Image (cartoon, rainbow, N blue to C red):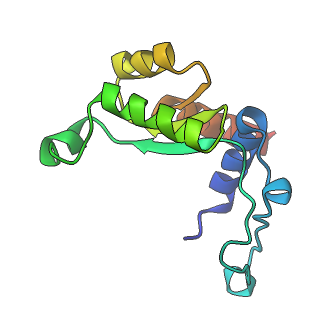
Amino acid sequence: MVFAKHLRIIGDEFRAKYLNSTDKQDQTLYNEDWTRMKNRLGSAKGAPYLGVHLRRKDFIWGHREDVPSLKGAVKKIHSLMKKHKLQQVFVATDADGEGTDTIKKTEKNFVPTMWEDLHNAAQMFTQRKKA
């Protein structure tokens, strides 16, 4: 999947600032011409964090049996962090404030990413581009 350049810039800045992650150190260098990207499967090093896409809100209503409770998700996050010896977790979620508060209380190395954070980052990028 190829994302728009301005979205990649926002993501790269976020990763560098909050996750100690860059394309160079993670060996995930990007070529603007995606047809020329010839990375071998498994060649990326990856960064020192666990990435979690934690779906909540309306997704739960259609998939109740497939979606863990918030406490169940946090328990699984902890077990994966322990298994992979990681100290930080990046959670992309549409959970409400109460949901993210629950995660924050139980996971001290939680790096939250909410729609508002991305919206604010996009606004900063747009303002910077105009200047």
Rendering coords of residue 108 (x, y %):
59, 18
Please give left or right for residue 83 compared with residue 126 in the image: left
Specify the quadrant of the image occupied by residue 96: top left
Q: Residue at x 65, y 37 (%)?
A: 86
Indicate whether 17 appears above or below 12.
above
Q: Quadrant of the C terminus?
A: top right
Indicate whether 63 appears above or below 108.
below
Which is more toward the observer, 44 or 24?
44
Indicate whether 63 appears above or below 24.
above
Q: Quadrant of the N terminus?
A: bottom right
Q: Residue at x 66, y 39 (%)?
A: 85
Please give left or right for residue 1 compared with residue 32 in the image: left
Which is more toward the observer, 33 or 127?
33
Specify the quadrant of the image occupied by residue 121: top right
Q: Residue at x 25, y 35 (%)?
A: 57
Rendering coords of residue 55 (x, y %):
34, 41
Please give left or right for residue 107 compared with residue 94 in the image: right
Please give left or right for residue 85 compared with residue 100 in the image: right
Q: Residue at x 73, y 65 (%)?
A: 44
Rendering coords of residue 78 (x, y %):
50, 31
- Count the marks: 0
Rendering coords of residue 33 (x, y %):
73, 80
As drawn, which residue projects farthest toward the front?
83
